[in-house]
Image (cartoon, grey):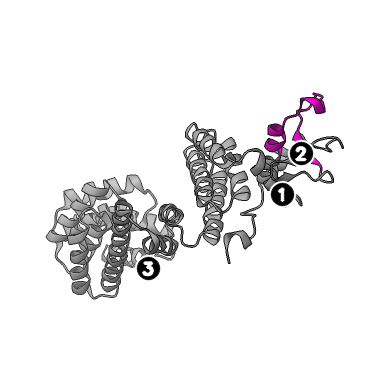
Amino acid sequence: MSSQEKPHIPFPPSDTTALENINYISLPDDIERQIGDFEIDPSIPLPVEVPRGTEQLLESLSWEMIVAAMLKLFAYQPEHPHLDYFRRFIQQIQPDIVNVMTQTGVLKAKNKDFALAEEIFRSLVNFAPEQESNFVNLALVFEEKAKQHRENRETEAEEECIELAFEAYKRGSLFHPEAPDLHFSAGHFFLQQGNIPKMKEHFSTFLAHSEGEEEKEQQVRKVLDEVDNKRQDDLVFNEAFDFIKMGQEERGIERIRYFLDRNPEVWNGWFLLGWGLRKTGQYSEAKEAFFKTIELNENHPDTLNELAICNLELEEYKDAKQHLETALRLEPDNTKIISNLGILALKQGDPQLAKRFFLTVLELDPEDPLAQQYIDKIDKES
């Protein structure tokens, strides 16, 4: 199916208030009916925008004013029954209208006049859907609007613009299934949205149909390779986590070391390595991993707690206390940290202080079995 046979409505208009000043006129009987190869149909009223509070005389009208009103209809009333007639009318009066409007729309977008830029490109995707650049430009306007809303923390408006950008790329792809520039732009859009399947779909289409665009092709192949590598690394990370969680620590440690060789700056990779080493009793090596975690992610309660456990096993009680107290300031209700403070107190020979810590744990979590066991042990031995 060709682009001319496809529907000319990319998506419904957003706000039709821009049409409030549109009025319709009938041309006088004695007006010249022929404009070049185009014949005026007097039975079809022509639109014109008349500002409120003004009187517009027929004598002061121009073809350009009528064209401007028609273009608003393409943007905000794409279901108008006479759009095909208006399209032919505009093409005769202003044959270079697409280029002129495109230049204006791009300039408005650069100046962050997104409302007018959106109107221009909404009009163009309905007026000239055969030009792929119209869909790309409209989508880019929505992307820039979304970015502005994100900076202003206007989440709902941002999401709406992202949906509209998605729709522009979607409809553009229907009209231009093999257009490389459209698929190049759409691929980057979906990459930013984290939609990896759609990103791959558009970038693959771009590579299949691009010709002589070596710089773009290299860029796309690099992105695809990086995404594939990341997906592979994610699988390795998840495997390591599962092995350690299921008690197969040595296999987990092996996998996470492989991951860290490729991703040495990922803090939770070092945390996972420390966790596995700590579970196998390699406390000194685990400490090094946890210190690397802190270096990359500053103080995190879980990291500090795990580091303190290593300190406890190595009888480094001063360090253990420091790390646990820092962790507790970050998360005052963390029962794991409070329990470890209780264990530290026991190791330092203060069972009553330990009991107070375990009672605090039970206040926060009455179902905690470990705290109750320690309390029972302390009561039995006292």
Q: Quadrant of the C terminus?
A: bottom left
Kind of residue at badge 2:
Pro
Image coordinates for residue 216, horizontal then vertical, percent: 33, 52
Q: Quadrant of residue 226?
A: bottom left
At which x and y percent is residue 274?
A: 20, 61
Q: Given contact means CB atoms under 8 Å apart, are the residues at marks 3 and 1 in contact?
A: no
Question: Label 1 amino acid?
Answer: Leu
Residue named by callout 3 = 369
Residue at which label 2 appears: 47
Please report the residue visible at 50 percent of the width from the left and 33 percent of the height from the top: 107
Q: Quadrant of residue 366?
A: bottom left
Instruction: Name which of mark 2 and mark 1 comes first in the sequence.
Output: 2
Which residue lies under the disc numbered 1? 83
Tell which tag, 3 or 1, sits nearer the viewer. 1
- Amino acid at circle 3: Pro
Asked if residue 74 lies left or right of residue 290, the reply is right
Which portion, as a residue range, is magenta? 45-69
